[in-house]
Image: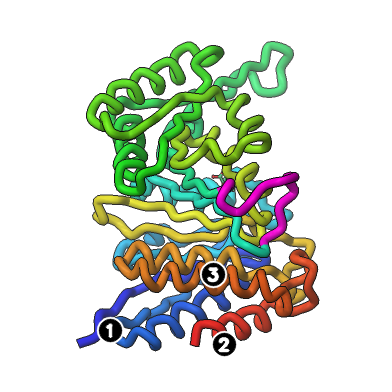
């Protein structure tokens, strides 16, 4: 009997649904070629349009509805007219938090044929995996806003670093470094953040004791940004807090082909809850509805779905096909210097897979 993998699809806003459509084409094709499993997709019309109609980004029982799926495939969240903190706290961040998706895996890998703004780098120089803490830290959402609008107005935004939360992400990164044979770099900022990051550094040191064969080091976040540009080859597995991970992965995307290629997986490693897969480029209102959005990041995140369900060989096949498409450079969207539409790229991709 065929294994069925049930995917909740939240296209969301702007180009989200357009790019997911191509990722879904790819997943369908890959499972058809393999023959041992099948994806079942269910659409959820949530996002900013839904908010403008109902006052909510998703229904009250949205999380409960999603909990019945094996995974979530998310397009993009955010649209002019709905404040970002409302749309994101009401959907993307709510899902990450509710399903304890505490690991955010963001590959930063330069494929052949992908544009790179750095001078004199080879593909093998940029090949890292950033493990971003995804459940607490600077994104705790805790704080206070006192005396609004008064001269003595005060705003407090708390970072929350729990021992359990810090240990589990650092351990995940060390496990990955051990498994892949890559070095591990912890990105922090203990010279300025005297509680959160001094604590983070001490946990990294502690956990490292359990992995004597992993070679690791700690780099200050500002220096890490400099090294991403100057010496990207020094990074293998990188582990960082929620906000630092956010910042360095945009920088990572910029050096490894651009946002048009950047994918991220929000993982609950215990598999108690569904994990979520997304291109990280956002809704791109300026080109939404024109059919020219680059679907390659959504397709890359489809490969992360395949990896997650144990079909690594197929995930790799998808990445190899992205590389072929880039090297051929015949069917690409305008952001990559081509003139193809979103669906033309998807169709060309399917032909390559066969
Ligand atoms: C990302 C995004 C989100 C984040 C925003 C949209 C809240 O930038 O997934 O990287 O900061 O996590
Ligand atoms: Mn980001």
Q: Looking at mark 2, is its residue's CB closer than 8 Å to ligand 1?
A: no
Residue bearing the label numbered 2: 351
Q: Secondary structure at mark 1?
A: loop
Q: Is residue 116 magenta?
A: yes
In the image, the segment drawn in magenta is 114-126
Residue bearing the label numbered 3: 299
Q: Mark 1 and 3 residues: CB-CB less than 8 Å, in contact?
A: no
- State the residue at coordinates (63%, 56%): 281
Q: Residues within 10 Å of mark 2 (few under 14, many from 20)?
A: few
Looking at the image, is 135 positioned above or below residue 19? above
* Viewer-closest of 73 and 34: 34
Rendering coords of residue 27 (x, y %): 45, 78
Rendering coords of residue 318 (x, y %): 49, 72
Q: Is residue 41 visible?
A: yes
Q: Secondary structure at mark 2?
A: helix
The residues bearing labels 3 and 2 have C-alpha atoms spaced at a distance of: 14 Å
- State the residue at coordinates (60%, 21%): 155
The residues bearing labels 1 and 3 have C-alpha atoms spaced at a distance of: 21 Å
């Amino acid at each position: 009997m065929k294994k069925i993998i049930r995917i909740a699809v939240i296209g969301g806003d702007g180009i989200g649904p357009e790019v997911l459509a191509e990722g879904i084409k790819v997943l369908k094709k890959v499972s058809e070629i393999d023959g041992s499993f099948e994806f079942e997709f269910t659409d959820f019309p949530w996002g900013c349009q839904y908010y403008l109609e109902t006052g909510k980004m998703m229904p009250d029982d949205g999380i409960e509805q999603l909990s019945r799926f094996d995974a979530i495939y998310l397009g993009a969240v955010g649209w002019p007219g709905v404040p970002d903190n409302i749309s994101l706290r009401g959907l993307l961040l709510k899902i990450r938090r509710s399903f304890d998706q505490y690991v955010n895996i963001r590959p930063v890998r330069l494929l052949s044929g992908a544009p790179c703004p750095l001078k004199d780098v080879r593909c093998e120089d940029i090949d890292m995996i950033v493990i971003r803490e995804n459940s607490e830290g600077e994104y705790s959402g805790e704080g206070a806003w006192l005396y609004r609008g008064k001269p003595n107005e005060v705003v407090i935004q708390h970072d929350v670093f729990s021992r359990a939360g810090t240990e589990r992400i650092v351990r995940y990164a060390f496990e990955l470094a051990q498994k892949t044979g890559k070095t591990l770099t912890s990105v922090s900022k203990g010279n300025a953040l005297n509680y959160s990051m001094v604590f983070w550094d001490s946990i990294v040191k502690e956990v490292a004791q359990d992995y004597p064969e992993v070679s690791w080091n700690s780099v200050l976040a500002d220096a890490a940004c400099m090294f991403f540009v100057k010496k990207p080859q020094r990074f293998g597995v990188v582990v960082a807090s929620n906000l630092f991970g956010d910042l360095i992965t945009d920088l990572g995307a910029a050096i490894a082909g651009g946002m048009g290629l950047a994918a991220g997986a929000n993982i609950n490693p215990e598999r108690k809850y569904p994990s979520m897969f997304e291109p990280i480029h956002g809704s791109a209102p300026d080109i939404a509805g024109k059919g020219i959005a680059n679907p390659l990041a959504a397709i890359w995140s489809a490969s992360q779905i395949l990896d997650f369900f144990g079909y690594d060989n197929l995930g790799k096949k998808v990445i190899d096909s992205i590389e072929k498409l880039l090297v051929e450079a015949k069917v690409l969207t305008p952001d990559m210097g081509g003139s193809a539409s979103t669906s033309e790229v998807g169709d060309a991709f399917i032909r390559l897979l066969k």
